[in-house]
């Protein structure tokens, strides 16, 4: 499939990570099908141990100590964390976890330098998080470069390991950040290198909440199921 793309936009391609020999469960296949339905003109690309074109898996195992360490210990969530940053920085596109379903096209976000959704807000301003289960970026994005550099060295020196924590660390280092408003008052937050969208756009219910169809609003584009079953 040949995909035309305007300059300075996120390419119409969706990446996901999956073990090359691992069978996909019904819910995973159902999520991927929603991507095809909502974004029919997007290229959908699986990254696995045999990948080379967009992400040279074996080369990364040889060149990045953190990536090799988490791979050797079968810490698959951390493996996927690194892959999403490297593959989007090198190529541009959208990364989706395999427990994310799309209910609307993602085209409206392609002109952003990068995009991600707010996951939660903390009343004291500490522990405000985004959720990069849905993450898009233009090639060469500055924020993603900061995170790649973090993976090269600082991750060994700081007690920060998860994607939400690493993004929060990057936001504080690069931008003047402020506490996120509560869910009902959230608006788009535009940093120079990434736009943060209200919870209802990508993350309509929080990880400790039970899904309720009423959480789906007019502006909701994806649902992150937090590893649970689709309803």
Image: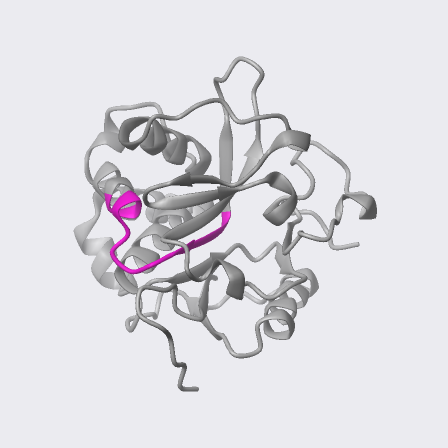
Q: Residue at x 69, y 40 (%)?
A: 205
Q: Residue at x 48, y 17 (%)?
A: 126
105 with respect to 190 (left or right): right
The location of residue 75, given as percent across then percent down, is 43, 44
Looking at the picture, the colour scheme in use is one colour
Q: Is residue 135 magenta?
A: yes
Q: Report the number of discs.
A: 0
Q: In which quarter of the image is the N terminus?
A: bottom left
Q: What stretch is highlighted in magenta?
A: 133-145
- In the rendered view, would you say 11 is above or below 117? below
Identify the residue at image location x=49%, y=75%: 42
Residue 89 screen position, x and y as percent: 29, 56
Q: Which residue lies furthest to the top in this view?
A: 124
Asked if residue 230 lies in the magenta stretch, the reply is no
Nearer to us in this view, 118 or 33: 118
Q: Can you tell which quarter of the image residue 119 is in?
A: top right
Residue 180 location, x and y as percent? 53, 27
- Left or right position of 132 against 219: left
Q: Residue furthest bottom?
A: 1
The answer to whether residue 102 is left or right of residue 229 is left
Horizontal and vertical percent position of residue 23: 57, 67
Q: Quadrant of the C terminus?
A: bottom right
Closer to the camera in the image, 166 or 199: 199
Residue 101 location, quadrant? bottom right
């Amino acid at each position: 499939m040949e995909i035309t793309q305007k300059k300075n936009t996120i390419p119409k391609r969706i990446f996901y990570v999956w073990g090359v020999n691992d069978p996909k469960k019904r819910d995973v296949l159902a999520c991927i099908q929603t991507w095809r339905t909502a974004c029919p003109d997007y290229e959908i690309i699986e990254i696995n141990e045999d990948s080379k074109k967009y992400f040279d898996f074996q080369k990364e195992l040889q060149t990045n100590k953190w990536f090799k360490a988490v791979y050797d210990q079968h810490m698959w969530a951390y493996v996927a964390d690194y892959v999403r940053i490297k593959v989007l920085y090198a190529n541009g596109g959208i990364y989706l976890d395999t427990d994310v379903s799309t209910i609307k096209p993602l085209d409206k976000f392609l002109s952003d330098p990068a995009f991600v959704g707010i996951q939660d807000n903390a009343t004291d301003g500490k522990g405000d998080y985004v959720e990069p289960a849905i993450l898009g970026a233009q090639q060469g994005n500055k924020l993603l470069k900061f995170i790649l550099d973090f993976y090269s060295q600082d991750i060994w020196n700081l007690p920060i390991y998860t994607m939400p924590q690493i993004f929060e660390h990057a936001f504080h280092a690069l931008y003047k950040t402020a506490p996120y408003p509560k869910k009902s008052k959230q608006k788009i937050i535009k940093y120079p290198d990434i736009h943060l969208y209200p919870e209802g756009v990508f993350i309509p219910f929080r990880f400790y909440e039970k899904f309720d169809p009423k959480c789906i609003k007019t502006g909701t584009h994806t649902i992150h199921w937090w590893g649970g079953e689709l309803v």
